[in-house]
Amino acid sequence: MNKTAKNLDRFERWMLHVVSHPKGLEAGLASDEAKSTWPNNDLEDICQAGPELSALERMRVYSDMYYWRLIDVLAEDYPTVRFVLGGDDFYDFAIQYIHRFPSTSPNLSHLGQHLPLFIAETEYEVAQREFLVDVARVERASSLCFDEKDRPSIPSEELLGIPPDSWGDVRLDLIPAHQLLELNFPVDDFIQAHREDQHMEIPEREPSWILVYRREYSIWRSSISE
């Protein structure tokens, strides 16, 4: 690695430490991680002031947008969770989640993978916690199904070719773009009502089963019996 590449690597690591610090930009600039990555350098030596913004204000643009972009991703993946929590509470909740499970992949579809678990176990006060866990599981399953690779289903001729006396030994597996969920609440109608901008009260606790699947690049849900 030549000197230019090394400096770029150091700068990118310094930038990450600074803009992603859970206590804010100033804490990131003062952190041991930032200082060890780029020692003996003041902010003005790295980021020049502009005609209207100081060096600190210019850095704050990146610091603010780092979190806003990640929060937007979570809001897109979990729209009903956001609705139940409300905008301000969802923002605070999302910040807590990102601090607990920071982004570690260039693919932002992985960002919210732990959110159902976080809702269930976090000390952060969450309204309607058990119901919200089920909602989050369904919305996470929708993201998983959307991103799964294609795999052809079994042709009907192949099924018809199985001898009747062999069916007792047959095991059918769902293709990857399917998720079968056992839930504690009937959340399907509530999720659909929110997406259609209709009001619906949070339902009473009652076991339910949902099949989430992809068909022609659209995500579908089917409530099914046990």
Image (tube, helix red, strand yellow):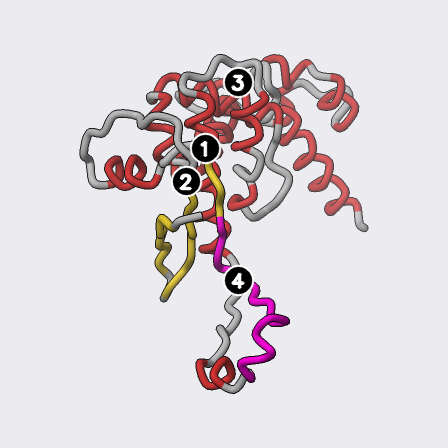
Magenta highlight range: 163-180
Mark 4 vs mark 1, foreground winner is: 1
Q: Are marks 2 and 3 in contact (CB under 8 Å)?
A: no
Residue identified by numbered label 1: 184
Q: Earlier in the sequence, mark 4 or mark 3?
A: 3
Within 10 Å of disc 1 (Cα), the crowding (few <14, some 14-19, many 20+) is some
Outermost residue, front side? 165
Badge 1 marks a residue whose secondary structure is: loop
Q: Is residue 79 magenta?
A: no
Cα–Cα span, label 4 and label 3: 53 Å
Depth check, front residue: 169 or 94? 169
Badge 4 marks a residue whose secondary structure is: loop
Picture quadrant where residue 168 is located: bottom right
Residue 2 location (% of width, % of height): 80, 49
Q: Earlier in the sequence, mark 4 or mark 2?
A: 4
- Does the image show residue 19? no
Tell me the amino acid under the disc marked 4. Answer: Leu
Residue identified by numbered label 3: 56
Depth check, front residue: 111 or 113? 113
Q: Are marks 1 and 2 in contact (CB under 8 Å)?
A: yes
Residue 11 location (% of width, % of height): 68, 35
Cα–Cα span, label 4 and label 2: 19 Å
Mark 4 vs mark 2, foreground winner is: 2
Q: Is residue 196 above or below residue 19?
A: below
Identify the residue at image location x=46%, y=24%. Answer: 130
Residue identified by numbered label 4: 174
Residue 27 location (% of width, % of height): 63, 13
Q: Is residue 225 left or right of residue 118?
A: left
Cα–Cα span, label 2 and label 3: 52 Å
Within 10 Å of disc 2 (Cα), the crowding (few <14, some 14-19, many 20+) is some
